Amino acid sequence: MDPAAPGPLDPSVLTMQASHRSSVLWDVKVSDTETIYTRHPDSAPWAIDARIVPYLQLARLHDFHLIATCHVHRCTPVRKLARQSPKSADDATVERYARAYLLYLIGAVLFSDKTGNRVQLLYLTLLDAPWEVISGYSWGSAALAYLYRRLCEASQKNVKEIAGPLIILQLWAWEHVLIGQPMRSVGRGAFAPPLLPPPHVPYGSRWSFERRTRTHTGSGVGFYRDQLDLLRADQVTTSPQLVL
């Protein structure tokens, strides 16, 4: 790459470079209008009917549910439906509520779109199956592939929003890059890293705790751009991928 004329030397290699956001950076046309937006998470934890939990375990989505309850926004009609299962409901009714909550977890968290309040009905076909079939789905690899696709779309010029399981990207960034990590308040003006969770709790839930610092979130995009420009090698953890 020539610093005076940035970009690939061979344009046949990076075929989408002309529409990539990096070309805007090189042209020094960056402003707040180039910021990509998404829905802001609500860090307050929330609970569901305890009778639904065994079905989440059968579907192998219970761990992701635990992480989502700590980091993902809460206002979704489908999620409210799952919480309102009657106390007198029989097993068949509870199972239907469990599938409704899974529809929320899949459509609004794992594979969310930019609408923020809709779930695609195509995910119903995944849930219209016996639990032993649902438990065989590779949710993790599908969510990761979906996240990569959304990141690819967001890398293009003039894109204003991004969707997908961004909590995965957020947790990865907190684990591997020191910039913007929330810290625990342990006293007046004293802070400490988050504690490791118990063995039965997903590792990624360690970033959800009371009295955590939020000063980095109020500094806006400019803070992160400046800090990334000044990023040092010792501020990046190159450990293998962690199980969230």
Image (cartoon, helix red, strand yellow):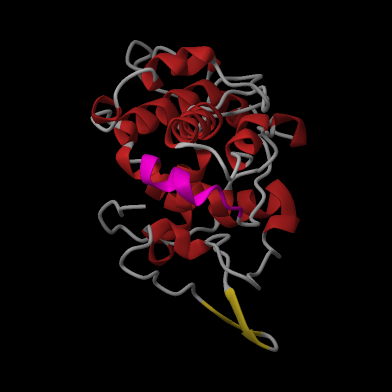
Side of 62 where 199 appears, left or right: left
| The one of 138 and 193 positioned closer to us in this rendering | 138
| The one of 89 and 147 positioned closer to us in this rendering | 89
Residue 169 screen position, x and y as percent: 46, 43
Side of 138 where 111 appears, left or right: right
Residue 77 screen position, x and y as percent: 68, 31
Magenta stretch: dominant secondary structure: helix
Q: Residue at x 55, y 25 (%)?
A: 154
Q: Could one spot residue 6 in this view of the protein?
A: no
Q: Could one spot residue 126 in this view of the protein?
A: yes
Q: Quadrant of residue 140?
A: top left
User: Vertical placement of 10 versus 199: above or below?
Assistant: above
User: Vertical placement of 233 versus 41: above or below?
Assistant: below
Q: Residue at x 57, y 68 (%)?
A: 209
Q: Residue at x 38, y 57 (%)?
A: 202
Query: Can residue 159 be found in the magenta stretch?
Result: no
User: Vertical placement of 206 versus 20: above or below?
Assistant: below
Residue 146 screen position, x and y as percent: 41, 26
Q: Quadrant of residue 16?
A: top left
Residue 100 screen position, x and y as percent: 52, 29
| The one of 86 and 57 positioned closer to us in this rendering | 86
| The one of 117 and 3 positioned closer to us in this rendering | 117
Rendered-image quadrant of the N terminus: top left
Q: Quadrant of residue 73?
A: top right
Magenta stretch, residue numbers: 46-55
User: Vertical placement of 103 versus 49: above or below?
Assistant: above
